[in-house]
Amino acid sequence: MPTRRNELARQAARLFAEKGYHGTSIGDLAEAMGVQKGSLYAHMDSKQDLLYETLHDGAEAFHGALDAIPEQLPAVDKLRLALRAHLRIVAEQLDVATVWTQEWRYLEGARRDEFVAARRRYEERIRALFQEGVELSELRADLDVSAATLVLLSAANWAYTWLQPGRDTDALADRFFALLVDGMRGYSTPA
């Protein structure tokens, strides 16, 4: 049974995704919880806390998905599984993924710095998979690893805008993979 705090975090993520961080008032949160505004402060210090928690949960989900990929696999298989995992998280945690993509810029101070660092680490981890593919001759030797990373993450991050509920995200990820990565594989040459 979820606690009131967990329910508040879930409602905050939903409202931030629907109305935006600045478009969501304490009154909106209270209404969603069925309580008076003042009652919310028993479960939170500020709306910033709820934004941080949502973004922290997203960072943990995305990094956790990469952590679960077996290290011994070929780089292109790791990339495919990373894309599958990313789309699965978007589908299963649509509100969190929306806030991850859109609302993070409203986080303030040290928490913003922490989140930006986690987001950059995630991007670097994806970039490292592309770099590994190049170094192992699984991807073309002249691949622009930075651009490839941005293409993959741009497609995956914006899935929150078009992903339909109940869609087979693994099959979708595999189709994306074929378009993105197989095109990048091209004429791989030994290093």
Image (cartoon, rainbow, N blue to C red):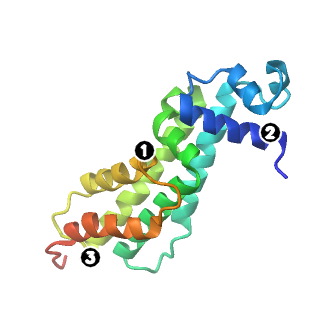
Inspect the image, locate mark 3, and give the three-letter code of the amino acid beneath it: Glu
Q: Earlier in the sequence, mark 1 or mark 3?
A: 3
* Count of numbered circles in the view: 3
Inspect the image, locate mark 2, and give the three-letter code of the amino acid beneath it: Arg
Cα–Cα span, label 2 and label 3: 47 Å
Q: Position of residue 118 (x, y in %)?
A: 52, 46
| Circle 2 SS class | helix
**Left or right for 28, reference 148:** right
| Quarter of the picture holding the C terminus | bottom left
- How dense is the environment of label 1, judged by Cα within 10 Å: few (below 14), some, or many (20 and up)? few
**Left or right for 83, reference 22:** left
* Label 3 sits on residue: 138
* Label 1 sits on residue: 161
Cα–Cα span, label 1 and label 3: 32 Å
User: Depth check: 158 or 32 in front?
Assistant: 32
* Label 2 sits on residue: 5
Q: Is residue 184 above or below residue 24?
A: below
- How dense is the environment of label 2, judged by Cα within 10 Å: few (below 14), some, or many (20 and up)? some
